[in-house]
Amino acid sequence: MKKLISILCIITLFLVTTSSACAETVVYNTKTGKYHSLGCQWAKKCTVNCIKLEKKDAKARGGVPCKVCGG
Ligand SMILES: [Zn+2]
């Protein structure tokens, strides 16, 4: 199922000219290594150690999803 979603995502990328179609921005806490969805209460509270980046980049940095919002 995940593979199917990936294929759909790739197809969407070809159809849509913007490369950000499948990119999901998260708030990554560089101190705790957790990443949050933009609407997460913890993401809003995190102002010092947090940076916005793509979820795949957060994972590449060893980030783990927040338990509250699921990343
Ligand atoms: Zn969160």
Image: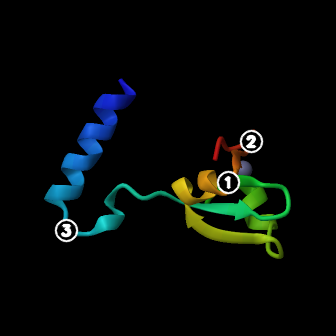
Decide: few, some or many residues near mark 3? Use Cα within 10 Å; few <14, some 14-19, many ≥20.
few
Q: Secondary structure at mark 1?
A: strand
Check the image and report above or below for 71 versus 39. Answer: above
Check the image and report above or below for 15 versus 46. Answer: above
Q: Which residue is mark 1?
A: 36
Q: Quadrant of residue 51?
A: bottom right
Q: Amino acid at mark 2?
A: Val
Q: Secondary structure at mark 2?
A: loop
Question: Mark 3 vs mark 1: which is more N-terminal?
Answer: 3
Residue at coordinates 79% horizontally, 74% vertically from top-left? 47
Q: Does residue 57 appear left or right of residue 44 in this picture?
A: left
Q: Which residue is mark 2?
A: 68
- Expressed as whole percent of the image width and height from the top left, the position of residue 5 reads 32, 35
User: Total marks drawn?
Assistant: 3
Decide: few, some or many residues near mark 2? Use Cα within 10 Å; few <14, some 14-19, many ≥20.
few
| Residue extending farthest left | 15
| Residue extending farthest top | 1
Residue at coordinates 32% horizontally, 60% vertically from top-left? 21
Asked whether mark 1 lies closer than 8 Å to ligand 1, one says yes
Q: Which mark is residue 17?
A: 3
Asked whether mark 2 lies closer than 8 Å to ligand 1, one says yes
Q: CA distance from mark 3 to mark 2?
A: 33 Å
Q: Which mark is residue 69?
A: none
Question: Mark 2 vs mark 1: which is more N-terminal?
Answer: 1
Q: Amino acid at mark 3?
A: Thr
Residue at coordinates 61% horizontally, 51% vertically from top-left? 59
Nearer to us of marks 3 and 2 is 3
Question: Mark 3 vs mark 2: which is more N-terminal?
Answer: 3
Residue at coordinates 81% horizontally, 66% vertically from top-left? 45
Q: Quadrant of residue 8?
A: top left
Q: Amino acid at mark 1?
A: His
